[in-house]
Amino acid sequence: MGSLICEKCGKTFHFDVIPRRGAICFGCHVKTVRLGFSHGQENFHGRTIREQEREIWDAAKRDGRDIEYVGGR
């Protein structure tokens, strides 16, 4: 177990294993992490999954196709 002084805020923090982020405490590290979307942001701002499913089923019925869930056979 060791201790380091944070390069950003100057607080002393303790660790069991040397952190890969260097001499930066967890609090300062979390402030720099950008929590955001990399993929799938439209799923939270657009149509719901159920609405998308209904559209797929309706389009298949219009085209005369018989569709079913994967693994439903």
Image (cartoon, rainbow, N blue to C red):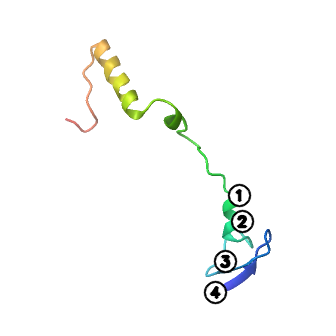
Sequence-earlier tag: 1 or 4: 4
Q: Marks 3 and 2, Cα distance to the nearest angstrom?
A: 16 Å
Q: Marks 1 and 4, Cα distance to the nearest angstrom?
A: 25 Å
Residue type pointed to by label 1: Thr
Q: Which residue is mark 3?
A: 18
Residue type pointed to by label 4: Met
Residue type pointed to by label 2: Cys
Of the numbered discs in the image, which one, if any, rests on residue 28?
2
Q: Marks 4 and 2, Cα distance to the nearest angstrom?
A: 20 Å
Nearest to viewer (mark 4 / mark 2): 2
Q: Residue at x 62, y 79 (%)?
A: 17
Whether pointer 1 and pointer 2 mark residues with C-beta atoms closer than 8 Å, the reply is: yes
Sequence-earlier tag: 3 or 2: 3
Q: Which residue is mark 1?
A: 32
Q: Helix or strand or loop: what does disc 2 sit on?
A: helix
Q: Helix or strand or loop: what does disc 1 sit on?
A: helix
Residue type pointed to by label 3: Ile
Residue 64 sits in quarter: top left
Q: Marks 1 and 3, Cα distance to the nearest angstrom?
A: 19 Å
